[in-house]
Amino acid sequence: MSQPSLLGLLKQVSRSFYLSLRLLPKPMREGAGLAYLLARTSDTLADSEAVERDLRLEMLQKFVDDLEEAAMRQPWPDPLLDGVEHPGELELLLRVPELLECFKAMSPRQQGLIRDVIATITQGQLNDLEYFSHGSGEAITAFAASSELDRYTYQVAGCVGEFWTLLGFETLGDGFSEHSPDALVEMGVRYGKGLQLINILRDLPQDLRAGRCYLPVADPQDREALMMEFRRHCGLAEVLIQQGFDYSAQLRKRRLRMASVLPTMIAEGTLEQLRQASWEQLESGIKVSRARVYGCLLQALLH
């Protein structure tokens, strides 16, 4: 897959990451972009709720196996494709063979990094589908402990901070950062967890309607207890995403700092709205405006 084609597909399925990717130095850009598209593929397989759950589980495992072999052995079944509503996500699924060809052309080290991060993400998604398999709007299943939420946020997002760091050192060497890779990995993991926690907080009403609650509450139907846990996790998310500013400050190249800090700035805008939101506003949907996103981009340019 050519770089222009890769960027074009990214633009269809991501609003903010597309901006970050374009800021990255060229040696890091292709690996980061390909990993994002593969991760977005697994998201589509896991999250397409019009598709029967057992089929989603089967297709997620098929995707992991295809990536391991760097080849798509069989096409996606029609019931899966028919259940994907977003045109960009449907195109993404149809172009997985191209993504795998691009993957095969990468260095063995980058292939290993991408395989590892996608394996961790898909394991989190498989666990998610199994854990909440019996949940419904009338009988909501919730995480029983904060440790389960912490593990989930690592599997689906914290590991991305780890991947981003290792890919940076692999492609740019000392040009990525003069600081310890281990320290940066730890910081990147916390940053990724914070971004995912904000997604969880933003999507709370939608998840409850689907029968799942990622916040550890004894009774997800108890609105007062739920909102207390929501406010507490807003505070935790704020602490975690501050790692994004600390992380980006450790990077050597200006474009790297810009690409890394942009998600932090967008997340801050979302969190600002979440902290002030009533339940009714959460149900209506919290979203950072396009104007705010481009304002964050301008801030990142000056960072």
Image (cartoon, rainbow, N blue to C red):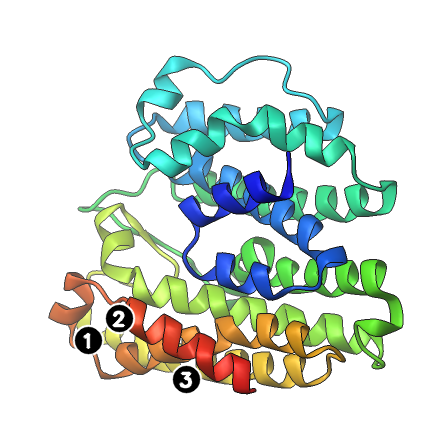
Q: Give the image quarter of residue 295.
A: bottom left
Mark 1, secondary structure of its residue: helix
Identify the element where label 2 is drawn: helix
C-alpha distance separating marks 2 and 3: 15 Å
Mark 3: amino acid:
Gly
Residue behind mark 2: 226
Q: Amino acid at mark 2?
A: Leu
Question: For residue 224, which numbered disc appears in the image?
Answer: 1
Q: Position of residue 239 (x, y in %)?
A: 51, 85
Image location of residue 131, percent across then percent down: 45, 44
Look at the image and tell me in which quarter the C terminus lies.
Answer: bottom right
Image quadrant in which you'd find residue 226: bottom left
Residue 299 position (above or below residue 29): below
Q: Is residue 48 visible?
A: no
Q: CB under 8 Å between callouts 1 and 3?
A: no
Q: Which sits in the foreground, 41 or 122?
A: 41
User: Where is mark 3, residue-wise?
Assistant: 235
Q: Is residue 54 above or below residue 267?
A: above
- Viewer can see residue 269: yes
Q: Assess whether mark 1 and mark 2 are in contact (beta carbons under 8 angstroms).
A: yes
Q: Residue at x 78, y 61 (%)?
A: 166
What distance separates the C-alpha of mark 1 from that of mark 3? Answer: 17 Å
Mark 1 surroundings within 10 Å by alpha-carbon count, few (fewer than 14), some (14 through 19), many (20 or more): few
- Within 10 Å of disc 3 (Cα), the crowding (few <14, some 14-19, many 20+) is few
Direction from residue 30 to residue 124 in the image, left or right: left
Q: Residue at x 26, y 45 (%)?
A: 210
Secondary structure, mark 3, is helix
Judge by depth and name the residue closer to the eye, 234 or 245.
245
- Identify residue type, mark 1: Glu
Q: Earlier in the sequence, mark 1 or mark 3?
A: 1
